[in-house]
């Protein structure tokens, strides 16, 4: 800390402990959001002012320990070790004290200057517990402040404790003894580390490095191996570990158990049950909402209502945006006599239409995130993940993957964005990759038109089968990605569920705003680019500028004909179907409209279906294959932009490629399989 | 007070059973209507009151199942499960009612925005539905069940 200025404060805590709320309380909700270097885990930074002292507050990912089992845990540990925050505020849950104290003990071993915020003290009292925070302060030797993040209780005291901790010198406190044999090995290694790698022992506590080496921590071993003399320490540590494991079995588990016993011992010493409780309100509600029979229907019903809220409440706001941008603004440019025709078309049909495409999505995204944040704040989202965790774990996916998939049935954009609630980075990337396979609302008109035109009485079942196919493919692809592309342990089963809490309006508003803002800023740029490219292809041909009504002669038409006579020849789709697929890249709704323009019958779904029958564009088999292709191929440009914003450009391109390949393979299998069965 | 709660509970339990059966029935009819619409088999049963929508059917069946389960737990003497099941079912029913009312308001707003006439049909088509009607009936029952559940979880301490 530089004379009390530019101090660095890190917030750390187990998931669902109320960390974000405390962050908002400390910083007044003013934060800037970015990503941690090299990964797509969100980094939130804010400013804290306490009596003239200004500190930068960093919200670290929710973690259970400092052993790097996940990217989040590695980020948190590396931040504390490398950035050396002046104060680490460990937010503990008074209703889940053992796990929180385990994390606090780990932080103290790391030599951090810790202040403990004992949050949810009101819930603990409701559950019938009395937590003695003064005794905990004595046991840990660090300041402990009781807080209730939802009401703001204790926040001023916490600010004062942070201020005091910033002004005091940090103390290195050892809290866990691992038994005679292990302690002897720790001492030997500690001495060796101080002698051979002083540059490392100046940065990290030697005792902590020694414990990590005995635990077999790969990250620390790698760091040591890079230093002169470090390899000798690693060899010595491995030898000591092997010796100890002959007597104590797995040493990592042994050390973890000792640390956990210490946390448990402290929890027992400070928690008193003042009333005997048989069942809490949370337990009573969970007996139904996580019930083996009623739980899933409740989850699907609640998500259905969320879905209705987002999609059926947004139309007036969408229409206002549509009227202003695609109506007034568009007409203003088109009617302009100053602009040349091509420029007016670029502005009206390219840029303004592009902006319209982005902004029309905005109310849906905002309402969706509003409902989602409400369910998250109440504590219900964790229950949904819990319900499907067992099934999804068979596909190496965490239960939380269900949320983007279900949301994706409405619109893939919020579906992809909902993946950010998945803590593990590999799990999140996989979920974002498979979320577009959920059949969104925009695909439905395409199914209805094609199935209605060529599949007769089987139309309904054909449409239904698209939804099933989407989920089956999502699970299979999820398994494949998790097995080969995003390797590593899954975040696994959810160990405990947070208690239900009253929603906090300011927290919900802040979450909704942050998520919506990110969509608007980042998705907008890519969508604009995509729309302009497609516009160019549709108005320009070998003869130059053709205007918006000559698609057949444009480059889009030429590409469509070339593709239908080569790559798509086995599927038997004509050039119109192929051009419609190209335009479906903007938004899947555009597919039906493009058919209408190409058949010259307008955009009415019934007229398009009749035209398809008259032109014999599809047989039942090729029509069904086309529906499957529309389900799987390239998510719309907005979804792709959302993937880019969540995972980066590389993964957006990878999604584009894998979905086209998968769509092609599935469509080919349908056509070839049908022909093999004698279906024309 | 505890005696009063028991009296309330005895009076409300048959109502919960009847409402549970009603929700199961409309959920079932909604699925039948959806199948009729899908296969183009002709006239649906009261399509204005019971929409042919799988989401609507899912919500109605879940509420119905939860309320029937509440009666089952009541007969078994499991008071906490009885109250929790009834409370969760009624909350979902009220949630469905509230969403439908918000959707109707949005439709009225939308009609104003696009310059269409705000006719009575918008309100009648969207509010004269079984989820709104039954939701209105269940609304007063939600309060005593929520209070009883809160009370019993406090009493059990």
Image: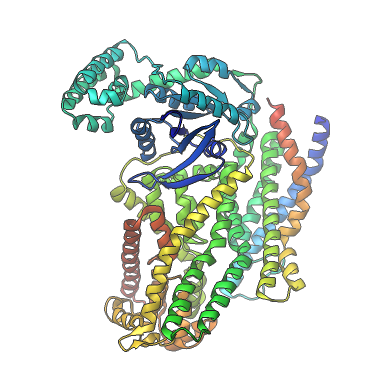
- Looking at the image, residue A456 sits to the left or right of residue A282; the answer is left
- One can see residue A470 in this view: no
Q: Residue at x 63, y 45 (%)?
A: A505
Could you tell me residue A212's position as x and y percent? 30, 25
Could you tell me residue A420's position as x and y percent? 45, 48
Q: Residue at x 49, y 25 (%)?
A: A115
For the image shown, how many numbered marks are present on the structure? Answer: 0
The front one of A234 and A677 is A234
Quadrant of the rendering where the N terminus of chain A is positioned: top left
For residue A590, above or below residue A661: below
In the picture, residue A580 is in which quadrant? Answer: bottom left
- Looking at the image, residue B48 sits to the left or right of residue B39; the answer is right
- Looking at the image, residue A63 sits to the left or right of residue A369; the answer is left
Could you tell me residue A590's position as x and y percent? 47, 75
Instruction: Residue lying at the far top in this picture: please name it.
Output: A180
The front one of A655 and A544 is A544
Q: Residue at x 35, y 21 (%)?
A: A255
The front one of A258 and A32 is A32
- One can see residue A112 in this view: yes
Could you tell me residue A418's position as x and y percent? 48, 52
Quadrant of the rendering where the C terminus of chain A is positioned: bottom left
For residue A523, above or below residue A48: below
Colour theme? rainbow
The front one of B137 and A512 is A512
């Amino acid at each position: 800390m530089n004379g009390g200025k530019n101090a660095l404060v890190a917030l750390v805590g187990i998931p669902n402990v109320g960390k974000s709320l405390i962050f908002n309380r400390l910083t007044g909700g003013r934060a800037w959001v970015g990503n941690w270097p090299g990964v797509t885990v969100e980094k939130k930074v804010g400013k804290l002012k306490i009596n003239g002292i200004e500190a930068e507050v960093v919200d670290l990912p929710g973690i259970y320990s400092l052993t790097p089992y996940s990217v989040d845990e590695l980020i948190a540990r590396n931040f504390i070790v490398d950035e050396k925050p002046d104060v680490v505020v460990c937010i503990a849950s008074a209703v889940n004290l053992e796990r929180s104290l385990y994390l606090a003990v780990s932080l103290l071993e790391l030599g951090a200057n810790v202040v403990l915020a004992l949050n949810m003290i009101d819930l603990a009292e409701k559950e019938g517990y009395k937590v003695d925070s003064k005794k905990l302060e004595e046991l840990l030797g660090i300041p402990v402040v009781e807080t209730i993040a939802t009401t703001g209780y204790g926040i001023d005291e916490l600010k004062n404790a942070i201020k005091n901790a910033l002004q005091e010198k940090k103390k290195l406190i050892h809290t866990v003894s691992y038994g005679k044999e292990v302690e002897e090995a720790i001492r030997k290694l500690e001495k060796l580390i101080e002698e051979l790698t002083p540059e490392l022992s100046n940065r990290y506590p030697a005792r902590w490095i020694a414990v990590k080496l005995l635990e077999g921590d790969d990250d620390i071993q790698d760091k040591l191996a890079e230093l002169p003399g470090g390899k000798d320490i690693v060899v010595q540590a491995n030898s000591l570990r092997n010796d100890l494991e002959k007597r104590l079995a797995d040493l990592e588990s042994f050390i973890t158990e000792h640390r956990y016993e210490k946390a448990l011992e402290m929890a027992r010493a400070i928690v008193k049950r003042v009333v005997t409780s048989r069942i809490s309100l949370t337990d009573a509600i969970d007996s139904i909402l996580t019930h083996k029979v009623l739980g899933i229907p409740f989850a699907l019903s609640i998500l259905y209502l969320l879905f209705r809220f987002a999609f059926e409440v947004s139309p007036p706001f969408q229409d206002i945006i549509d009227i202003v941008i695609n109506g007034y603004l568009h007409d203003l440019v088109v009617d302009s006599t100053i602009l040349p025709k091509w420029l007016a078309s670029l502005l009206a049909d390219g840029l303004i239409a592009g902006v319209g495409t982005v902004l029309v999505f905005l109310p849906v995204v905002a309402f969706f995130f509003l409902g989602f944040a409400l369910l998250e704040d109440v504590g219900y989202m964790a229950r949904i993940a819990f319900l499907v965790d067992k099934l999804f774990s068979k596909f190496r996916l965490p239960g939380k993957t269900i949320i983007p998939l279900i949301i994706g049935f409405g619109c893939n954009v919020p579906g992809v964005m909902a993946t950010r609630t998945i803590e593990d980075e590999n799990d999140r990337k996989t979920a974002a990759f498979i979320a577009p396979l959920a059949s969104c609302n925009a695909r439905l008109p395409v199914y209805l038109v094609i199935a209605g035109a060529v599949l007769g009485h089987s139309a309904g079942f054909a449409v239904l089968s698209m939804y099933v196919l989407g989920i089956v493919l999502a699970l299979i692809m999820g398994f494949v990605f998790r097995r080969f592309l995003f390797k590593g342990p899954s975040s696994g089963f959810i160990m405990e569920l947070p208690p239900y809490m009253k929603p906090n309006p300011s927290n919900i508003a802040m979450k909704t705003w942050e998520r919506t803002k990110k969509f608007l800023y980042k998705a907008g740029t890519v969508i604009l680019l995509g729309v302009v490219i497609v516009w160019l292809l549709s108005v320009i041909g070998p003869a130059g500028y053709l205007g918006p009504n000559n698609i057949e002669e444009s480059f889009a038409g030429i590409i469509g004909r070339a593709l239908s006579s080569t790559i798509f020849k086995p599927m038997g789709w004509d050039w119109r179907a192929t051009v419609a697929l190209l335009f479906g890249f903007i938004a899947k709704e555009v597919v039906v409209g493009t058919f209408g323009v190409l058949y010259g019958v307008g955009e009415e779904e019934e007229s398009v279906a009749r035209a398809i029958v008259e032109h014999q564009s599809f047989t039942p088999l090729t029509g069904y294959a086309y529906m499957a292709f529309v389900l799987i191929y390239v998510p719309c440009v907005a979804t792709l932009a959302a993937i880019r914003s969540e995972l980066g450009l590389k993964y957006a391109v990878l999604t584009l490629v894998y979905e086209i390949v998968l769509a092609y393979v599935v469509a080919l299998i349908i056509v070839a399989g049908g022909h093999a069965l004698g279906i024309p | 007070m505890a005696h009063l709660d028991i009296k309330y509970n005895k009076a409300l339990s048959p109502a919960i059973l009847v409402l549970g059966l009603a929700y199961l029935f409309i959920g079932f009819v909604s699925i039948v209507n959806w199948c009729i619409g899908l296969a183009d088999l002709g006239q649906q049963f009261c399509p204005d009151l019971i929409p042919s929508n799988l989401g609507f059917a899912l919500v109605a069946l879940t509420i119905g199942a939860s309320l029937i389960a509440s009666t089952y737990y009541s007969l078994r003497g499991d008071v906490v499960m009885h109250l929790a099941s009834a409370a969760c079912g009624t909350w979902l029913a009220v949630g469905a009612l509230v969403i439908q009312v918000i959707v109707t308001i949005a439709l009225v707003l939308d009609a104003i925005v696009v310059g269409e006439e705000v006719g009575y049909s918008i309100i009648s088509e969207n509010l004269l539905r079984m989820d709104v009607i039954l939701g209105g009936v269940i609304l007063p029952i939600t309060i005593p069940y929520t209070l009883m559940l809160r009370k019993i979880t406090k009493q059990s301490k």
